[in-house]
Image: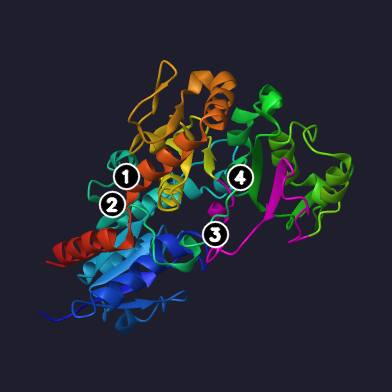
Amino acid sequence: MSKINVLVLPSDRTGVGKFRSVDPHVYLQNNYSEEFHVDIDYEPKINDEQYWKKYQIVHFHRVIGKDYNTSPKIIKQLNDWGIVTICDIDDYWLPGKEHPAYELVKSNNLSFHIQENLKAARFVTTTTELFAQEIKKTNKNVFVLPNAVDPNEEQFNEVTENSEKLRFGWLGGSSHLHDLMLINGTVSKLTEFKDEYQMYVCGFDIRGNVTEINPQTGERKQRPIKPEETVWKKYEEIFTDNYKTISEDHFNYLMKFEVDGDYTDKNAFYHRVWTQPVTSYAKNYSKFDVSLAPIKDTMFNRMKSQLKVIEAGFYKKALIASDVGPYTIDLKHALNKGEFTDGNALLVDKHRNKSDWAKHIKKLIKNPTFAEDLGERLYETVNGTYDMDTVTKKRSEIYKEVVR
């Protein structure tokens, strides 16, 4: 059998493009080179028939090209030529009103356009069975190819330094204020343990613009956002109990917003960790012992992937997570009536956000060896399931199947 030629059209050069398009297909090319030839193209030749006809599979993330209006027509044309079209999607098409992208998605009718692309594609790939069931209302031909990591990748092999204090960390982007509000007030309930643990916020970023509207003329002007206006400062307030847990000297240092700097006292309660490129951000898991993963119970969040579970697992980090959506897939609660069980994480019921985040953190502060045990158990959960070897083998079998 001749090689299957696969054309991959990433949606971006970072972030989702790395996890859903580039890395999986580079791995496919490197490890199944006798069966597949892969090209990755960020600027496809939309109007060149011969360009398309070199391939048996065209894999794209949400849209082909930059124009959502013409994308379904292109997909239909490829289908008519006998080319297998696979639309990949990792996020629900309509974020909630609290999400920063909501107005953009709504004003451009993007949720409709994304669903049109899903309908037009021969097949769809996505991250979880939960999301697959929702997508099947639009296109029944769905395969689950979960997010995966290469455990040999350098950023997943950073050494964690020893510490006498248990370190809790959150790692994410700028769209999670509504999620982090679930743990607002948690630190204030743990005042008596302030000297026994630390908090890390990873991904801190002060880049970006704000739009100001003249109330008299309606004129819109953009200007660079001030550091104190960013959502990251609000995150910081949540993790420091409005800066009450840090010294005046530390507070003054933080308010300078010195990019890439860190406070010199390693024993300080709170640590700000600046944003890193997608090729190295996972190194931040080495800075703490317990990963925190609060998510609000919304449709958008329920359809998310379990990437935080996977990343924490390969770093052998304990995990405290909301008992919602993607975190119900692989996680089993490890407490029963206050006693440790054989679970692999600590889960917080959506009705107990005001109490259980602090309760679980306190439990691990008082039992740090159990945090180590949870990390080992989580590693056993993800290893052999969410590594690139396993998922790429499944991908190769799916691709051969759809071409047949």
- Residue 402 in picture, x, y percent from top left: 17, 62
Labels 4, 1: front one? 1
Mark 3: which secondary structure? Answer: helix
Check contact, mark 1 vs mark 2: CB within 8 A: yes
Left/right of residue 280 with respect to residue 141 in the rendered view: right
The disc at residue 308 is none
Label 1 or label 3, whichever comes before in sequence order: 3
- Label 3: which residue? 283
Q: Using a 10 Å C-alpha cutoff, classify the residue at mark 4 as few (fewer than 14 neighbours), some (14 to 19) or many (20 or more).
A: some
Q: Quadrant of the N terminus?
A: bottom left
**Mark 1 lies on residue:** 381
Hey, what amino acid is under mark 2?
Answer: Thr
Is 96 covered by the magenta stretch? no
- Secondary structure under the numbered disc 2 in the rendered image: loop
Amino acid type of the residue tagged 1 in the rendering: Thr
Looking at the image, is mark 3 or mark 2 earlier in the sequence?
3
